[in-house]
Image: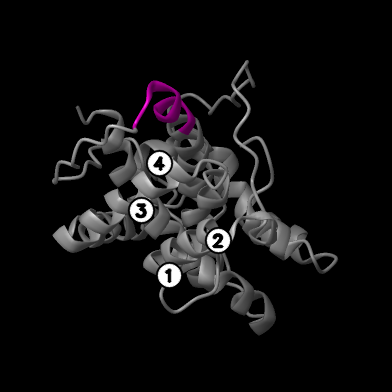
Amino acid sequence: MPFPNLVYRVLADEPGRLESCWHRVRPGLVLVGARRLRERLADRGLTAAFSPEPQEFVTDERRRKLTDVLNAYDSGNSCNAVLITLLLQGARGDAESRLVPVQPPRADVPGERRPLPPMLELEAMSDATREQVLRLARMVDPKGDVVPSLFRHLADDEGLLNIVAATLRAASLSGDLDRLHNEITARVAATITEWPVPVDPLTDPGTRALIEPFARVIPRMLAVSAVLHSIMTAD
């Protein structure tokens, strides 16, 4: 990803906390690779069943913008959904794990890519845009107060944000959003059982309290992404 995830920034507020979490999950991640986790959670058969209504305001430029944002977050969220679950639940370790590729995973070499739209702070948004972003955040996690960064990247284009909101409302009403969320949660659970090395769960209540909201939000955002990818193919 082109910037540190929100969960990393939250954990980094206290010296040593992020490092402690990272050292627990790094040995397995080195063996598995982040690309493998994206294949498992975001790139295999996750499609919305409903067909979104054609939107005359979905221009090619807006499709490109949404695609760039979704692709960045698909990579980060796939990795973080697994790592946060490991930190909360731990893993017994599977020495014969099928997660480990035959060839050692290669680190992606950053290539040229279009910069993502600016990630606006809530205070920098108009009242209408801020309320729309907060409604979307409540749709993702009614019990929490995390405002997913993905929505903040789209807040500079009110028209695109409205298209996203209409699509997610339709997916929520159809049950597609919940279905995809359940599928992703099941994939995370299966991945934990195949994690190649043991992981001791966090015992510090303060750190657990910090990441528990992300354990709810991140799989849900992967479901949001699967729904929003349907906008790119709608006529």
Give the structural element (helix, strand or loop) at label 1: helix
Q: Are marks 3 and 1 in contact (CB under 8 Å)?
A: no
Q: Which residue is mark 2?
A: 130
Q: Are marks 4 and 3 in contact (CB under 8 Å)?
A: no
Q: Which residue is located at x 45 percent, y 52 percent?
A: 195
Give the structural element (helix, strand or loop) at label 4: loop
Q: Which residue is mark 4?
A: 99
Precedes in sequence: disc 3 or disc 1: 1
Q: Report, in whole angstroms, how far the alpha carbon at label 2 lies from the one at label 1.
A: 12 Å
Above or below for 159 versus 165: above
Q: Nearer the viewer, mark 3 or mark 1?
A: 3
Judge from the rendering whether residue 143 lies leftward or rightward of residue 166; answer left or right: right
Looking at the image, which residue sits at the far front?
Answer: 127
Judge from the rendering whether residue 185 lies leftward or rightward of residue 113; answer left or right: left
Asked which quadrant contains residue 48, the reply is top left
Q: Report, in whole angstroms, how far the alpha carbon at label 4 lies from the one at label 1.
A: 34 Å
Give the structural element (helix, strand or loop) at label 2: helix
Q: Which residue is mark 3?
A: 165
Q: Which residues are magenta?
A: 58-65
Precedes in sequence: disc 2 or disc 1: 2
Label at residue 138: 1
Q: Report, in whole angstroms, how far the alpha carbon at label 4 lies from the one at label 3.
A: 35 Å
Mark 3 residue type = Ala
